[in-house]
Structure formats: C-alpha cells, structure tokens
Amino acid sequence: FGVDGEFAFQWGSGGSGEGDFDEPVGIAVGPNGEVYVADTWNRRIQVFDSQGTFLRQWTIDGWNSGVPEEKPFLAVDDQGHVYVTDPGYYRVLVFDSQGEYLLSFGKYGEDDASFGLPQGIAVAADGRVYVSDAHGHRVLAFDPIDFERFTD
C-alpha cells in the first residue's frame, strides 16, 4: 500500500517454491530496503527486494515443534541482523543478512531470560531487543548484542 492507503501491489502465492508461502507470518524491512518474510510451514526465511522479486532464502532449524501457536515473527536491526522468534523451542535465533546463523538466546521458563511462548519481536534504534512472551503475559527487553565478537 502507498502512504495514502491505496493498494500498490502484491506478490507470492501458496506453495513451497521460491517466492511461494505456506502461512507467512512475520515480515520486516532491512536497512537496505530488502523485505524479510517468515514463511512458517516451509520453515524458512525468504528475502525479496522492495518490488517483491525473490532474492534468497534460508531454512530454519526449528518451527517444527507441532505447536499450533508456532507463529514466528522477525525483526531486522539497522546493521541487517535478522532476529527470528522460534516459539516451539522458546528461543530467538539471530542471523546475518545472508542467513548465516550467529547465535540464539532464551529457554523455557519464567525468569527474565526465558519464555513461555516468544512471538512478537522488535529491535529499537539503540539495539535493545524486545520480545513479547504470549504465555508469560509480558514483554522482555534484552540489552544490545555485541556482534563484534562474532566477526573474524
């Protein structure tokens, strides 16, 4: 949609091919305008340009817990890191913009580092990560991640 609310265009259809979806849930736009989509039951992240042209994808080792509430959301920070909730395994996965796995955090529980069902996620301008814990009835805030320790 345009800023005036008028329909602009759409892309994708049902299926498992490049650019197809099986319950797309999370969507985010990266700093370079690329669009990231959590393609739930195909267990992958798909990346598109701003016009909906397929660019790349990577699989998610997760999203297979069988939990009907397995609705993964994602966020992209201003450096292009992709944060993906994995509700059935009570964690957040973090990738670089090309899909290279960097780290994960979270576990099942009720303490300040655990989740009952992580779903919504956002990254603030200062790098803090906010995760909604649907079963915990709360939003957790995590300090920015020091990604320099993951570079060569």
Image (cartoon, rainbow, N blue to C red):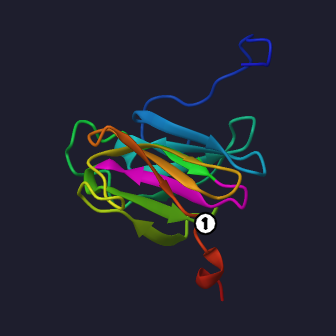
Pointer 1 local density, CA inside 10 Å: few below 14, some 14–19, many at least 20: some
Q: Position of residue 140 (x, y in %)?
A: 43, 50
Residue 119 lies, with reference to residue 63, above or below; the image says above
| Residue in the picture at 70% in, 49% down | 30
Depth check, front residue: 38 or 51? 38
Horizontal and vertical percent position of residue 87: 32, 48
Q: Is residue 83 left or right of residue 40?
A: right
**Helix, strand or loop status at disc 1:** loop
The image quarter in which residue 113 lies: bottom left
Residue 20 makes an appearance in the image: no
Taking the spot 29% from the left edge, 59% from the top edge, the residue there is 111
Residue at 66 percent of width and 80 percent of height = 148
Left or right: 10, with 66 as reference point: right
Residue behind mark 1: 96
Compared to residue 144, the image places residue 7 above or below, namely above
Q: Amino acid at mark 1?
A: Asp
Q: Quadrant of the C terminus?
A: bottom right
The furthest residue to the bottom: 152
Q: What range of the chain is rendered magenta?
A: 77-87
Q: Nearer the viewer, residue 29 or 106?
A: 106
Q: Is residue 86 magenta?
A: yes
Point out residue 115 in the picture as x, y percentages from the top left corner.
30, 53
